Structures are given as structure tokens and as C-alpha cells.
Amino acid sequence: MKSQLSDSTFAIGAVARLTGIPMDTLRIWERRYRAVVPQRSSQNRRFYSRDDVTRLLLIKQLVELGEPVGTVVHLEEGQLRNRLNAHAELQQSGNQVPGTVHRERYAATVMVFGEALPYQMRYWSTELEPLSLVGAYHLFNEFEQAVINHHPEILLLEFPALQAEAVSRIQGFMHIAPSQRVIVVYAFATRPMLERLRKLGVMALRAPVTPALVLEACQLPQHQSRPETDFGAHITDISPRRFSGKQLAMISGVSSRLVCECPQHLVDLVSRVAAFEQYTLDCELRTPKDASIHERLYRMTAHARATLESALFYLLESERIEIPDHEESEPVK
């Protein structure tokens, strides 16, 4: 009889996305090394616990650092973490060349919480040189106390699944440390959760992240610490819609004296472009670069929509087809 699956289990596809380990590799590590032993559903599908995901992340990082998978896969979680710490310390000491004079420059202080991100930040040290990592924690209560004691400028938190409890914790930080910038790295999240973060002024980065992306997020000016998803509301050079959805539907039903069906085709084009114009405003944004790209898409799409509306207006006037009022309830004849 299969064991009952808990709410905190992940299917193999989700684990592959969370860890960056291909599904075939996950199956091989299970069969050959028994790296983790996932639960099985009644349909014999694999489901992994949070502890399984953490263990796989640790193994993957050690393999990427050159450790043979057959050597590390049998280690306990504590041993895996110790080996990662040893790698980070060796890399840090190897970067300190005796006799080298370094020019002084300001480094923003960063404190990290998470399962894998603290280790990644350590062996990305050379690529994150403008930042000063002052603490890395796996237990949230220790991280919270360290933030209160040391007041780092940037808080970097990792949550594989961004759920209501995690967002509530983040919101608590906004009261404890209102002056600090908070950046969250996540793998899975619902739109309402991301919207809550946006309103709190928290930047959300979807995993997997790169050193360059983390560095860019940490170095942004404070007033740019998050992209605005409602950027379209602040743009004033966009022509308002010339036809409502109701008007377009009514025009589409009008018979034209033209042999072709240009009015209907233009109505379809205007409707589709207007829908995409709105879509660019609702797209999920992770970085200010995303916001800049989508703002430009919004502008170009809005101008295309206005051009198509002018073409439709010209055609309706040329064909002497009456343009229905917004409040008109009957189709034009």
C-alpha cells in the first residue's frame, strides 16, 4: 500500500525545475545511488519531500564543484553542508593573494537566508565582489535575530515555494528592518503572492538565478528596487482606445458593400492587438530590465492598435457605415 502523500511533496518535473537537475539524472541517482527515495503514488509516480529537494540541491552543488557524485551521494546532510563550507573557505582563501594591494571601495552588506543560496553566494564570491556577505543562515529564527543585531543593507531570502507563510514572514521584516532592501528568490509562486510582494516593495527573482542577476538586483538604486507592473498607468503619450469592445462586436456584424470582409478582419485585428496591449501590462516582471522591455512593448502595441483603429475608422466612413455609440444596444443597420 502506498503511503499517503503530504501537501509538501513535489512531482519529479517540479523537482527538476527547482534543482536544475534533469529528470533522467534524478531517476539515475535514485536507481544507481539511492540519493533519495521518493514516495510513490497509487499510479507509481514519484513525489519528493522538501528534505529530498534540499539534499539534491546540496549534492548538485558539490558535483558542480568537481566532487564525484558517487562519493558525495552517500553523505548525510550535515556532511554535505560541511563539504560545501570547506569549498567556500578554500575558494575565499585562494582569492587572497599575499602582497596584493586592493583599492578600497564601498561594498554593500548582504545577509542571506535559504537552503541552497547561502552556499551559492559563497562560491560566487569573486563574481559578487562589490557585495559584502556578512551572514548566511539556514534557520529562519537565527537569520531574523542576526538581521536585528547587525542591520545589513540588503536581505536576500530564498523560498522554493513562495506561500502565504513565507510572504507573512517577509512582511514582518518590513516592520523590523524598514530601511533594508529585501530581495526574494523563488521557484514557484502564485500571482497573488507576487502581487503582495510588489506592494511591499520587495523585488522577486525567479530561480535559478545567476551571479550577474543577483549583483544587478543588489546594486540598483533604492528607488528602483522593484519593477512596477502598473507602468502603463504613468504613460501619457498613448492614444486612448477609439472603439470599445461592444462597438467592435457591433461593427463586426454590419454588412459591407465591399466584396471582401475588410471591416470584419480589421475588427479582429484591433481586438487582438488591444488584448495583447493589455497583456503587456499584466505580464509578470522580475527585474527592472523586464519592466523596461514590457513598457516598450506596450508603447509599440498601443501605437499599432491606434493605427489599426484609424484604418477601421477610415473604412467605416468611406463605406458610410454608422459607428455605434457606446450606449447603443441594437446593432447598426
Image (cartoon, helix red, strand yellow):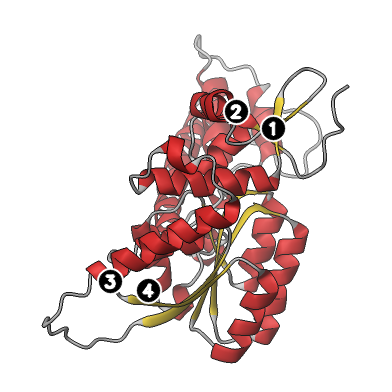
Q: Nearer the viewer, mark 3 or mark 1?
A: 3
Q: Quadrant of the C terminus?
A: top right
**Residue at screen point 49% across, 54% down:** 239
Residue 310 position within the rendered picture, expressed as x and y whole percent measured from the top left: 46, 39
In the picture of the structure, the residue carrying the numbered disc 1 is: 38
Viewer-proximal residue among 241 and 289 = 289
Provide the residue designation for mark 4.
219
Judge the density around disc 3: few (<14), some (14-19), many (≥20) Cα neighbours within 10 Å.
Answer: few
Callout in the foreground (3, 2) = 3
Q: Going from the N terminus, do you reach mark 3 or mark 1 first?
A: 1
Nearest the camera: 54 or 324? 54
What element does badge 3 sit on? helix
Badge nearest the viewer, 2 or 1: 1
Which residue does the image show at 62% across and 76% down from the upper left? 143
Residue position marked by numbered label 2 in the rendering: 321
Q: Label 2 sits on what residue type?
A: Ile
Q: Residue at x 35, y 49 (%)?
A: 65
Reading the image, the residue beneath label 3 is: 93
First reached walking from the N terminus: tag 3 or tag 4 = 3
**What's the residue type where badge 4 is placed?**
Gln
